[in-house]
Image: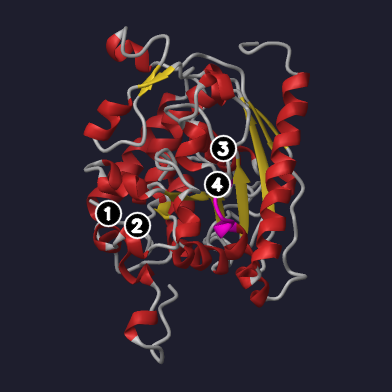
Amino acid sequence: MIKGDESRGEAQIMPWKSAAADSASRDPASRDPAFLDEVSPDEVFLGPAAASPRSSLNGAEATLTESRSAAGGPSDPATGPTAAAGPDGAARTDGAPPPTAEPGDLETALAGALAFLRRRITGDYVVDEHGFDPDLTEHVVAPLLRPIYRDYFRVETRGLENIPDTGGALVVANHSGTLPMDALMMAVAILDHHPAHRHLRMLAADLVFAVPFLAPLARKIGNTLACQADAEHLLNTGHLVGVWPEGFKGVGKPFSERYKLQRFGRGGFVSAALRTGVPIIPCTIVGAEEIYPMIGNAKSLARLFGLPYLPVTPTFPWFGLLGLIPLPSKWIIEFGEPVPTKTYTAEAADDPMLVFELTDRIRETIQHTLYSLLMQRRSVFF
């Protein structure tokens, strides 16, 4: 993996040498303030992460492909299973969908489960420098989320052709849901339905990495801190990165303000895209606003527990844990046309007027698409 330039001073070395340990010790005050408003606590559920001598994501993809073949998983009939992913380390090159057993195919499911357990016991899996564990993501987390994506929210995905098969790209989406699940559904959509079955690497808030048990899971499913250094490193190494610029303001807004975009921070995501020359892909999500209609906010209790908000919904806290079950709204996820940044120089990232203009352009694109999709849908639930 890429390491910092040894010719630079220690203070200028990028923090991805040991990202898992870094997340606990990094002072939030040292973070780029432009990124602080651009994430939320939910960009975490898709990804012991013991250090492996093979800390290459390409190696991880090779291991996954071999395991699919051993378990009778799908592979490209023309080329067969491939030994490694493309140079970006984030997309499969064999065209095979993620391993999923057909209904009733117990032998395939059992073989896959046993192969997964064998890899975990023998340590035959790879965790990258940010703590991402693609084996766990594909074989445990994604299968748990697929029934929710397919049967509960009945997600309809559009515009996946706007996401490149390889190379870095930044996906920027609206954020909502009170207890947000939009990032999870977006990641499943790309992993399962994009031709290259890419992993979405999500930028998460500091709060995520301050919660015991949640922090290591966040790393394993592909999240990293929402700072310029980590974002630019992922983009420079060819990963598909997701960011939700509204942050807590979007995900914790009252139901009366549904589908009204909040402020997009100070454009930190645009600066990262300009410095790395990757396209910005606007993404619009309809349906997440209705899963937990937030009719109140227990601010005093939220401050007591150190939370940005504590939602009150028609079912929570009145029905206890049952109130945490989301309403089965019908979702639409639409990926818009990419906004290219290669025409700009890296110095353009330091031009505040240009950054503001591009940030506002992305925000307006998503807002207009929201209005368009809302006009098209017949019902919240059908």
Q: Is 321 left, or right, of 263 in this rendering?
A: left
Which residue is labeled 2 in the image?
A: 131
Which residue is labeled 4 in the image?
A: 245
Distance in Å between CA atoms under marks 4 and 1: 29 Å
Dot 1: what SS?
loop
Q: Counting residues from the N terminus, which is met first, the one under dot 3 or under dot 1?
A: 1
Distance in Å between CA atoms under marks 2 and 1: 7 Å
How many numbered tags mark residues here?
4
Q: Is 286 left, or right, of 90 in this rendering?
A: right
* Pointer 1 local density, CA inside 10 Å: few below 14, some 14–19, many at least 20: some
Which residue is labeled 3 in the image?
A: 186
- The prevailing secondary structure element of the residues shown in magenta is loop
Q: Nearer the viewer, mark 4 or mark 2?
A: 4
* Pointer 2 local density, CA inside 10 Å: few below 14, some 14–19, many at least 20: many
Distance in Å between CA atoms under marks 4 and 2: 23 Å
- Who is closer to the viewer here, 140 or 247? 247
Quick check: marks 2 and 1 in contact, CB under 8 Å?
yes
Picture coordinates of residue 171 (x, y %)?
A: 61, 49
Dot 2: what SS?
loop
Q: Is residue 132 above or below residue 333?
A: below
Tag shown at residue 49: 1
Which residue range is magenta in the image?
264-269
Picture coordinates of residue 324 (x, y %)?
A: 36, 18
User: What residue is shown at x 60% (from left), y 20% (from top)?
Assistant: 154
Q: Counting residues from the N terminus, which is met first, the one under dot 2 or under dot 1?
A: 1
